[in-house]
Image: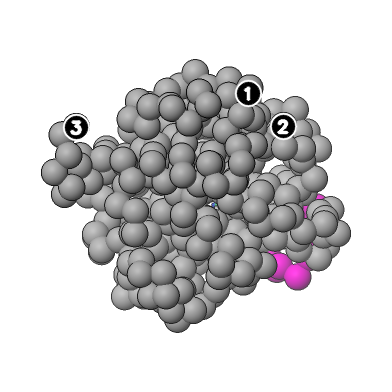
Amino acid sequence: MVVMAADTRTLRHDWSLEEIEAIYTLPFTDLMLRAQLVHRDWHRPNEVQGCVLLNIKSGGCPEDCAYCPQSAHYETEVGREKMLNVEQALEAAGQAKAQGATRFCMGAAWRDIPNGEPFDRVLAMVRGVRGLGLEACCTLGMLTDRQADALAEAGLTAYNHNLDTAPEFYGNIITTRTYDDRLATLARVRRAGITVCSGGIIGMGESRRSRYGLLRELSTQQPHPESVPVNMLVAVEGTPLSNQEPLDPLELVRMIATARILMPSSYVRLSAGRMSMSDEAQALCFLAGANSVFMGEKLLTTPNPEVDHDRQLFERLGMRLQMEANPSPAEASTCRKAVLAASHVAP
Ligand code: SAM
Ligand code: DTB
Ligand code: SF4
């Protein structure tokens, strides 16, 4: 079969919907094999990067993202909190490092970043996190060119801004900003020299075709996002998606495997949704090429597996946490050289 003979070493940016569908719908074992071949060519197969999330400003967001408990449009249990101070953020970052994370991600429920003191505070947090030797990632909503430059100057490794779903399904989920707004922010991040973290959510009632559409948007970016979080919907009471039927976890495994094959050099992050997955389903996600998880008992507002549980899972799987942060943004996607050097394979 043509797809099985595909080359694992070339980065492509011209994937078509038909090709993506052909990969996503492969017989499961063929899909796993193909994802593993790509994964092993570009990454250390038994290593997972640990990231920790901190919600630096919770709730009261003016956007209406239908999945989000932090939107002010819905009545959820998430309260509107004051922004954390720099000391609180750095204390959490220190704990994250002690738990074995190498990346620390700060999220704020903003439509866009308010200039002035709040933004200066974010810059101080970024400097502090980098000072601890961790990668620093932020997700703060839309940003201007000047803000992107200032974040880059403060040493920000990555900016997270998800496309969330395919363009044609996006309007069912968010009406307060457009797909093009999202793409424009990603372009600003890229131009400023910050690595791009962009992925999406599955399980929101979208069709498989919409999943292919999201994957096409991501994998035709040049360069690919260095980091691709794949979230499975956490249905939160009070949000419009609270009664959404749970998704078959094997769809998440297929999504991860396809992302791995389309974007070989990127970190593919098994993100929200692990609380509703068995250890075995998570193991399949690692087999499919996921090489990062969020650690710690809370994501931004929803629960996540305990650090001890993850430790035991990694031990049972003979996997380990990545020891070192990637030293520079550029490094974040050039792990292949290190892998090849370690395995004495000529590039
Ligand atoms: N306000 C920022 C933004 O939208 O870019 C940052 C925070 S937002 C919570 C980051 C991402 O988390 C969203 O784009 C979405 O993909 C994911 N997310 C939010 N709520 C979720 C949920 N209930 N289940 C799964 N993923 C979720
Ligand atoms: C991403 O794609 N997933 C993370 C991170 N980027 C910021 C956030 C998941 C949030 C899940 C819902 C919550 O805890 O509020
Ligand atoms: Fe606001 Fe982000 Fe939640 Fe959307 S996902 S409502 S932008 S915090």
Disc ID at residue 17 = 1
Q: Look at discs 2 and 3 and give the one toward the viewer.
A: 3
Identified by mark 2, the residue type is: Arg
Residue 76 percent coordinates (x, y): 78, 65
Quarter of the image for residue 303 reads: bottom right
Q: Which residue is mark 3?
A: 347
Disc ID at residue 209 = 2
Task: Please tell me whether the stretch drawn in magenta is mainly helix, strand or loop.
Answer: loop
Q: Residue furthest front?
A: 1
* CB within 8 Å, label 1 to label 2: yes
Q: Is residue 19 above or below residue 161?
A: above
Q: Tell me which residue sits at (53%, 26%) in the image.
A: 1
Identified by mark 3, the residue type is: Pro
Q: Is residue 24 above or below residue 256?
A: above
Instruction: Describe the element under mark 2 as helix, strand or loop.
Output: helix
Tell me, yes or no, whether the highlighted magenta stretch contains residue 79.
yes
